[in-house]
Image (tube, rainbow, N blue to C red):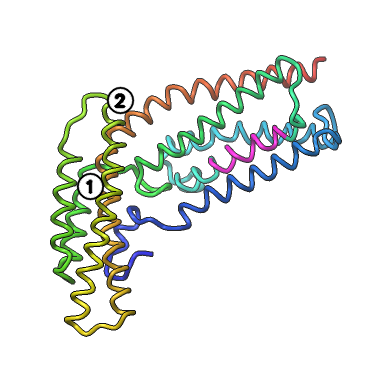
């Protein structure tokens, strides 16, 4: 949780437990549902040709086609359209998970005719591509559902954070000096291509973790010294350290986001070139499958 000393302006850079646990919880629920369905597949409670299995296929197909509504909303800025772009992105992600699960249950976790297999594997490729795209999207936006990040804006936030917090304490000045030096190294260094950007970014993430661990020890000593001078209790020292540690973590996250932004923007463009053809391949394969299923 961000301490009261830090403005809500810096929330996009904060590390919040719910942001880490929600995707894991959703993935676990999906995995359990698929596992249960797969273990029960031999009982043939669901068959693709009729009954519940047939309607699961219809529902899954509609969910996958409905993914296009997000693209439409993103390009249509009219206020007459219901829902914001972030809201439609949430719906898009839900449908991207919900649709494939329904199709898996529709198929009863078995392969079938050639046309159905092509449609199934095309859908799985689109779903996998969507998970990758969700990760990249989060790297180039201010929060998962926020606006697109800009490197210069992030640097302004970093400088503002230091001024805002520096007015409240000066013991962190040596910490911020090291962070500034680290930031200049990773932001000002040019990279010529995506591979170099990826390698450099990975190295800096490792460096950042070691530097953060060392600065945490340094902060703990600084807070202990200040606490003894001011006559603070153990609880006051702990709260002071937690506040300072959260600010430094935000500072780290903002620096790394600014440094990796160009690479992920390039990667996101390449991902789009792959994802859209896969999606339309899936749609065509699904249409052929539906036609063949009703024709024969």
Residue that appears at 21% across and 62% down? 218
Give neighbour class at mark 1: few <14, some 14-19, many 20+ (Cα, 10 Å).
Answer: few
Q: Earlier in the sequence, mark 1 or mark 2?
A: 1
Looking at the rendering, which quadrant does residue 264 occupy?
Answer: top left
Give the residue pinned by disc 1. 153
Q: Is residue 170 left or right of residue 30?
A: left
Residue 58, numbered label: none
Looking at the rendering, which quadrant does residue 7 occupy?
Answer: bottom left
Residue 125 pos. (x, y %): 56, 26
Residue that appears at 80% across and 15% down? 295
Instruction: Say what secondary structure mark 1 lies in.
Output: helix
Residue that appears at 32% across and 74% down? 239
Residue 195, numbered label: 2
Q: Is residue 273 left or right of residue 245?
A: right
Q: Is residue 39 above or below residue 254?
A: above
Residue 272 pos. (x, y %): 43, 26
In magenta segment, residue 258: no
Q: Which residues are magenta?
A: 93-104
Tell me how far mark 1 sits from mark 2, CA to CA: 25 Å
Q: Is residue 189 above or below residue 279?
A: below
- Give the overall secondary structure of the magenta segment: helix
Residue 137 pos. (x, y %): 41, 39
In magenta segment, residue 95: yes
Q: Is residue 138 left or right of residue 9?
A: right
Instruction: Pick whichever, 79 or 224, lies toward us.
Output: 224
Instruction: Pick whichever, 172 or 148, lies toward us.
Output: 172
Asked if labels 2 and 1 touch by Cβ distance under 8 angstroms, the answer is no
């Amino acid at each position: 949780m961000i301490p009261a000393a830090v403005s809500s302006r810096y929330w996009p850079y904060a590390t919040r437990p719910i942001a880490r646990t929600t995707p894991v919880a959703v993935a676990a629920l999906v995995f359990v549902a698929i596992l249960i369905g797969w273990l029960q597949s031999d009982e043939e409670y669901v068959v693709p040709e009729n009954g519940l299995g047939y309607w699961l296929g219809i529902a899954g197909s509609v969910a996958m086609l409905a993914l296009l509504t997000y693209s439409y909303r993103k390009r249509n800025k009219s206020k007459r359209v219901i829902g914001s772009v972030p809201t439609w992105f949430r719906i898009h992600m839900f449908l991207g998970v919900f649709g494939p699960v329904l199709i898996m249950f529709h198929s009863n976790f078995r392969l079938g005719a050639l046309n159905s297999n092509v449609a199934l594997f095309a859908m799985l490729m689109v779903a996998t591509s969507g998970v990758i795209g969700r990760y990249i999207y989060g790297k180039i936006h201010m929060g998962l559902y926020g606006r697109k990040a800009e490197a210069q804006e992030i640097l302004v936030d970093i400088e503002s954070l230091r001024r805002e917090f520096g007015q409240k304490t000066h013991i962190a000045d040596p910490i911020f000096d090291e962070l500034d030096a680290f930031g200049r190294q990773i932001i000002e260094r040019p990279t010529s291509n995506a591979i170099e950007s990826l390698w450099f970014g990975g190295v800096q993430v490792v460096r950042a973790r070691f530097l953060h661990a060392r600065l945490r020890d340094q902060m703990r000593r600084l807070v202990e010294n200040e606490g003894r001078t001011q006559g603070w209790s153990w609880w006051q020292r702990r709260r002071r350290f937690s506040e300072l540690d959260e600010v430094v973590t935000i500072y780290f996250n903002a620096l790394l986001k600014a440094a990796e932004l160009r690479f992920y923007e390039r990667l996101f463009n390449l991902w789009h070139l792959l994802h859209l053809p896969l999606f339309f391949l899936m749609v065509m394969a699904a249409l052929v499958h539906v036609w063949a299923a009703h024709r024969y």
